[in-house]
Image (cartoon, helix red, strand yellow):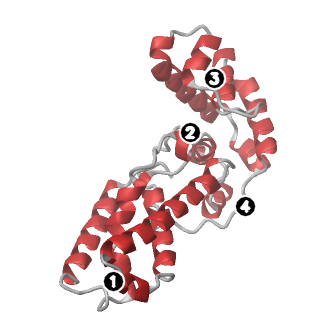
Amino acid sequence: MKKYNIQNYILYKNDVEKSIRKQEGLTWGEMTRDQVIIQFLPLVENLARKFSTSDQASGVMSINDLIQEGNYGLTAAVDKIDWNKILDSEDPEKTIKSFLSKRIKGAIRRGIDMNRADVRIPEHKLNEIRRNPDDENMVAMFFNSVFSSIDAHYDNEESPFTQVADNSEPYNIELINSYLLNLMRKYLTKQQYDVLRLSYGLDQDHKWLATDIAKHLNINVATANVRISQIKKDAIDALIANTDPSQVLDFL
């Protein structure tokens, strides 16, 4: 999800701007349901960008994902508008924005909560792994999906706007943590093992901050974020390089 597809985003923005220009001059009473939704798509993006997209804040979700969740909330909220109250208010536009904003932000928060905790791999991605059991890229996709703070670097990654719907169930978090810890003990150095273990809280109920990990491992705190991030990346690269594809298939 963290892959940010700029080209698709630009197309989306251009389409929204063109659609809004086409309905300029219409009053609220003249707009159809779809036109009202289009009119407030920029509001969704504005609200979505106020949410942090750091790993601790939003997990695997990118800004595109947040906008998509907000659009779901916008669509549902428009269907609940009481137009008699809106049109009778002193400032209809302000009243509509206030009504929609609360529901858009709520939808984004729910989306973050649903995707931040448990590990999910879309069903179509699982099918790719099973069809290509010897493909190292499939192993990389698996680990990059699990360790969501490391962006997946695939040139053909799909945009969230065109992504196949994910109907898969979340993995049992205790089971996957145990599985990962076993692989980490086998293939990583002590430092790499501890950094991943503490960063993702694999054997405890919370994640450690980079500065706390640096202190624990006697790493220079002044460069903690950069150093810990690099160790995490090196550790995941080591897992990808050493893990046999069959081990991933056995787990799935």
Which dot marks residue 169?
4
> Which three-letter amino acid code belongs to the residue tagged 1?
Gln
* Label 4: few (<14), some (14–19) or many (≥20) C-alpha neighbours in 10 Å: few
- Residue farthest to the bottom, as pictured: 30
Q: Earlier in the sequence, mark 3 or mark 2?
A: 2
- Residue 215, image x, y percentages: 60, 12
Q: CA distance from mark 3 to mark 2?
A: 15 Å
Is disc 1 in contact with disc 4, using a CB cutoff of under 8 Å? no
* SS at mark 3 in the image: helix
Residue 59: image quadrant is top right
Which dot marks residue 56?
2
Residue 91: image quadrant is bottom left
Is disc 4 in contact with disc 3, using a CB cutoff of under 8 Å? no
What residue do we see at 33% from left, 83% from top? 35
- Residue 169, image x, y percentages: 73, 61
Is disc 3 in contact with disc 2, using a CB cutoff of under 8 Å? no
Q: What residue does disc 1 label?
A: 35
* SS at mark 4 in the image: loop
Q: CA distance from mark 4 to mark 3?
A: 28 Å
Is disc 1 in contact with disc 2, using a CB cutoff of under 8 Å? no
Q: CA distance from mark 1 to mark 4?
A: 35 Å
> Which three-letter amino acid code belongs to the residue tagged 3?
Val
Is 170 displayed left or right of 215 in the figure? right
- Is any part of residue 231 visible from this angle? no
* SS at mark 1 in the image: helix
Q: CA distance from mark 4 to mark 2?
A: 22 Å
- Is any part of residue 109 visible from this angle? yes
Q: What residue does disc 3 label?
A: 195
Question: Which mark is in front, 1 or 3?
Answer: 1
> Which three-letter amino acid code belongs to the residue tagged 4?
Glu
> Which three-letter amino acid code belongs to the residue tagged 2?
Gln
